[in-house]
Amino acid sequence: MLKGRHLIEPGDFSLEELDRLFFLAGKIEDDGRYLRESCRGKLLATLFFEPSTRTRLSFEAAMLRLGGSCLGFAEPGSSSAAKGESLSDTIRTVSCYADAIVMRNPKEGAALLASRVSLVPVINAGDGGHHHPTQTLTDLLTIRRRRGELGNLTIGFCGDLKFGRTVHSLAKALSRYSGIREVFISPPELTVPGYITKGVLEKEKIPYSEAEKLEDVIKDLDVLYMTRVQKERFFNEEDYIRLKDFYVLTKDKMKNAKKDMIILHPLPRVNEIAVELDDDPRAVYFKQAQYGMYVRMALLASILGAVPC
């Protein structure tokens, strides 16, 4: 049962619980009336201490479609954090008002701290460069719906793999499935951290490789996960300018890709995927955003007790 549970990182739920969420999300996609009004009378607090468009609006759309209501803030300047209030006090207070809390915070570990003091379930919507579990649920659902399974696949991660919390979360989550191989494509300055390669993949005996050129490995991939170089994670603007255009996916580069490979991106896109690819049937990043709403509907309905899960 997921009722009353926190979601801080993808490993908090078993594979069976994830399968149930994906089943519910699939039913929501197939039947627009499924779970409508199931959370009427429930209130979701969205606390975003860091900018967001898709994640925040996706959660709010999910809650409204379930018949519930939302309150919260989209940036910390409009909260008492601007007055110096501690995160713990904010969470203790808000959990007196809401039935669940969704929080994004630039500090790693903030969501875990929130879960320890909250009176209601806390969902991590991103904590620094650490975890982004509902984006991971979105990614897994997209792969499952488009490829038919979550095992026996070669997944390529391209771009900012050092700071990309979506990459870290998904790479770790995929390690729980059989037949997975992971390929990390990045410049030397943005390679995936050792806590993922050594602490997760090597520990779980998941085969992986690293490359600097996308052209060298794209032919082997079943899924290509593109990411932007995140300006907000850099302390030195010169480093950002030097690396921001390191990878740009174009039609020419896609000529060597498999006909059934799918392109994912957590968005927002800057220029790392050429607009000319948006009409390619393998480009599913906007459908991926829609899947995000479906899986968040399934998640909210489950933790709020609207469905048995």
Image (tube, rainbow, N blue to C red):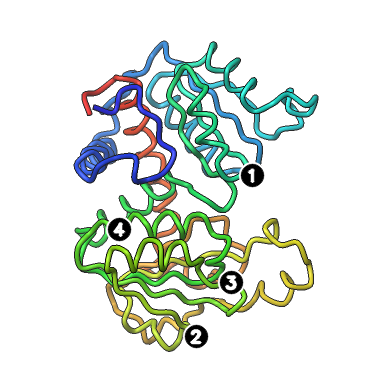
Which residue sits at x=43%, y=24%?
Answer: 121
Residue topped by disc 4: 143
Quadrant position of residue 297: top left
User: Which quarter of the image is occupied by the N terminus?
Assistant: top left
Residue 308 numbered tag: none
Q: Position of residue 149 (x, y in %)?
A: 20, 58
Front-most of 249 and 127? 127
Cα gap from disc 4 to disc 1, whole angstroms: 28 Å
Residue 106 shows which numbered tag?
A: 1
Q: CA distance from mark 1 to mark 2?
A: 30 Å
Assign the C terminus to one quadrant of the image: top left
Whichever of callouts 1 and 2 sits on the residue coming sooner in the sequence is: 1
Q: Earlier in the sequence, mark 3 or mark 1?
A: 1
What residue sits right under mark 2 in the picture? 213
- Does residue 256 sit above or below 203 in this rendering? below
Q: Residue at x 57, y 55 (%)?
A: 268
